Image: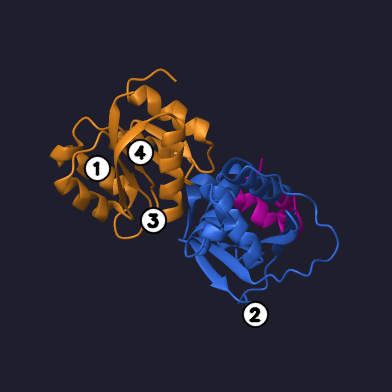
Chain colours: A blue, B orange
């Protein structure tokens, strides 16, 4: 497998090979930590993408990993992680969702040769609400994986800055 | 199984709860569960409390897990308590750094309760 530096030097199309790695990284986190399998998206959903978790990457790969879903889905995720009923989840919802994003980012970088050593992760940030736009100041590719968690959509993105 | 006093150090309260649950599922009888959000808080906990086992994240604000583990030899209440690092940092250099600093085990996130069991029980002198 090519190192991150070699991949980045070859241009945006090569990044696309990382999409399958990203999908595997996401699926593993949900299977191991939540005990559930993600499925392919089933058409459009009425559930809003009103919660976003983000983790910054710095070093050999700079960028932002983000995961979006509905607060309803993120509450169920937290309940599965903690072995509680969704009704019992309150302030832990954001913590759990941020930790999921952190594990996805870590699992992804550990699967790319050379990134585990040379890429650091920030602590997660969680945004609730959907009335915002995220603007990157660089004209760089975005890797995106769309999956389904139970009945709700799950969008995982990696914005690459260099 | 003998009763165990555990210190769980992670900046995520959810992860601390998951680790506590994993220990109970492994059959570890926990008499005391101390929690800390970073290495500095963990050292403060150890100033007043003796523990038998420490589970510790690496990436944390204020004081990270590697720095915390390096300071443990001078902490009387942590004497003899094995440390297991539990982190998203999965590189070989992180593992080497953690083990060199004094950790006895290393678990990469994401993990299963079985992985926690397999790492913890031998260190507590129990067959998995």
Q: Work out whether residue A10 or residue B18 is closer to the camera in this orientation and state it.
A: B18
Q: Is residue B102 above or below residue A112?
A: above
Packing grade of label 1 (10 A; few <14, some 14-19, many >=20) is some
Looking at the rendered image, the disc whose residue lies closer to the viewer, 2 or 4, is 2
Which stretch appears magenta? A1-19
> Residue B75 placed where, x, y %?
16, 41
Instruction: For marks 3 and 4, give the CA distance.
Output: 18 Å
**Disc 1 vs disc 4: Cβ atoms closer than 8 Å?**
no
Q: Give the residue pinned by disc 4.
A: B98
At label 2, counting other C-alpha atoms closer than 10 Å, the crowd grade (few under 14, some 14-19, many 20 or more) is: few
Q: Position of residue A107 (x, y in %)?
A: 57, 46
Closer mark to the observer between disc 3 and disc 1: 3
Q: Which mark is residue B70?
A: 1
The residue beneath circle 2 is: A133
Quarter placement of the N terminus of chain B = top left
Q: Circle 2 — which element?
A: loop
In the rendering, which numbered label is found on residue B11? 3
């Amino acid at each position: 497998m090519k190192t991150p530096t070699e991949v980045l030097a070859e241009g945006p199309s090569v990044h696309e090979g990382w999409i399958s790695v990203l999908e595997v990284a996401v699926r593993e986190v949900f299977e191991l930590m939540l005990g559930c399998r993600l499925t392919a998206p089933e058409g459009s959903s009425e559930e809003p993408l009103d919660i976003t978790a983000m983790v910054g990457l710095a070093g050999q790969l700079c960028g932002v990993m983000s995961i979006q879903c509905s607060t309803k889905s993120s509450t169920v995720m937290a309940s599965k992680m903690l072995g509680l009923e969704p009704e019992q989840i309150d302030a832990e919802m954001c913590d759990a969702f941020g930790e999921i994003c952190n594990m996805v980012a870590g699992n992804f970088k550990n699967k790319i040769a050379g990134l585990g050593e040379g890429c650091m992760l920030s602590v997660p940030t969680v945004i609730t609400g959907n009335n915002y736009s995220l603007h990157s100041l660089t004209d760089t590719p975005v890797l995106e994986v769309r999956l389904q968690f139970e009945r709700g959509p799950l969008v995982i993105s990696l914005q690459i800055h260099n | 199984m003998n009763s165990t006093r555990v210190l769980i150090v992670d900046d995520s309260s959810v992860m601390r709860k998951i680790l506590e649950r994993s220990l109970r599922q492994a059959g570890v009888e926990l008499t005391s569960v101390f929690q800390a959000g970073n290495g500095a808080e963990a050292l403060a906990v150890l100033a007043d409390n003796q523990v038998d086992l420490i589970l510790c994240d690496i990436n944390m604000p204020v004081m990270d897990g590697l720095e915390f583990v390096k300071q443990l030899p001078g902490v009387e209440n942590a004497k003899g308590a094995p440390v297991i690092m539990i982190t998203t940092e999965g590189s070989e250099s992180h593992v080497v750094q953690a083990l060199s600093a004094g950790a006895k085990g290393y678990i990469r996130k994401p993990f299963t309760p079985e992985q926690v069991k397999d790492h913890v029980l031998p260190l507590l002198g129990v067959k998995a």
